Amino acid sequence: MGRPLPLASTLLQDESTDAAPQGSLLAFFQRMGDSSWSTGLHESRYAYDLIESVHVWALCLFFGLAVMFDFRLLGWTMKSVPVSEVARRLLPWTAVGFVVMVISGTLLFSAIPLRSYQNIFFRAKMIMLLLAGLNVWIFHSGVYRRVTTWDVDNVTPKAARVAGALSLVLWVCIVLSGRMIAYNWFDCDRQPQPAIVNLLTSCVPTQAEH
Amino acid sequence: MSLLTFFQWCEASGIGETIRKSSWLFPVIEAIHLLGLGVIGGAVLVVDLRLLGLGLRRQSTAQLTRDAQPWLVGSLILMIITGGLLFLSEAIKCYYHDAFWFKMSCLFLAIVFTFTIQRKVTMSEETRLSPVWSKVVAVVSVLLWAGVGIGGRWIGFS
């Protein structure tokens, strides 16, 4: 499921890169997509499905425990457990899950690089991943440094609740957009698209595609 | 009425038809289904990691089970509703797909196990709990829920 037809994407790659300047990301991902590694993974009978399954299982570990931590920051669960305790005992597991997600995600990307790069949901997901990382950094270098002063407070500080809520919203949207990468509604080889879509996906539709 | 007739009736239902005809309904419902999976994963793991001695340690298992309970039940309900909708749109495919029956078996066992045996173990007094027994319970729980997830993912591959 979710794999676009190789033929269609090959067609698209040829057309797109005609317009792509040498050394551009577009040209880079085009070359990556032409590699034997990429086509092998793309056309494999089991490897792609297996990696995608690993990506989903790791989601339970990473997303599941990350949102439990967010829920704790928001005071929605485990209120009797100190925040620092939840962080110390559960966040290492989210780190493990995250590493597996990044590795499996990178492999999935390498199987379909150009199409993913030009996919609007993939782009949204990457931007939100950066924002989520920024949120983690702000939380840990800010209010979490003083965690001993509010560890067991009935209501966590506002900064902690904001961080928890932001994290929750971002990760939910990341999962949703990740799932939507599989659908080709806004793909470059499906024209005509509104100009804004082509702008956001760096798509230069050729005459032939209209 | 045979089981197949029932599945055919599900597939022909108005809801199934509506979801099949729409290009975005199935993806959106499925994405929500996936979010529910993540939350169930978290709620199950908090308790199972505690039983395995790999997660939170200072709190009683009984307390953590009570804390995780609303999220487990809530996301389970969300998954059953969204899963039911997805099922209505492709009931016949499910009928002939091994993965569907594997998933439903795991789901049935996981629910029964979680709310009977595991509940009894986690709610019993900590001192009376043998460490080996609680670890076995945690492993069985993780395996059963993983089976549900694996079966679900497998329905999508055909």
Image (cartoon, coloured by chain):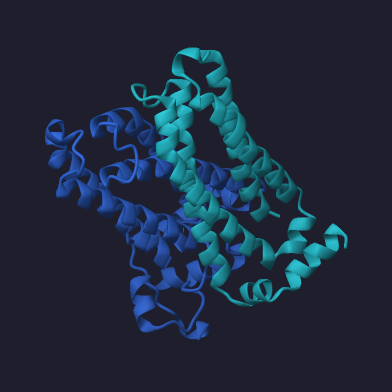
Chain colours: A blue, B cyan
Q: How many marks?
A: 0
Q: In the image, residue B42 lies at what x, y percent?
A: 44, 40
Q: In the image, residue A75 lies at what x, y percent?
A: 28, 45
From the viewer's perspective, is A143 left or right of A28?
A: left
With respect to residue B98, does A184 lie above or below? Answer: below
Toward the viewer: A6 or A28?
A: A6
From the viewer's perspective, is A105 left or right of B158?
A: left
Position of the N terminus of chain A by quadrant: bottom right
> What residue appears at the point 49 percent right and 41 percent down from the top-left corner?
B41
> What residue appears at the point 53 percent right and 20 percent down from the top-left corner?
B134
Quadrant for residue A79, please give it.
top left
> What residue appears at the point 45 percent right and 81 percent down from the top-left corner?
A206
Quadrant for residue B141, please give it.
top right
> What residue appears at the point 61 percent right and 58 percent down from the top-left corner?
B83
Q: Is residue A77 visible?
A: yes
Q: In the image, residue A91 lies at what x, y percent?
A: 33, 34
Q: In the image, residue B104 lies at what x, y percent?
A: 69, 47
Quadrant for residue B156, please give it.
bottom right
Q: Is residue A118 visible?
A: no
Toward the viewer: A199 or B129?
A: B129
With respect to residue A171, does A13 lie above or below? Answer: below
From the viewer's perspective, is B97 left or right of B34?
A: right
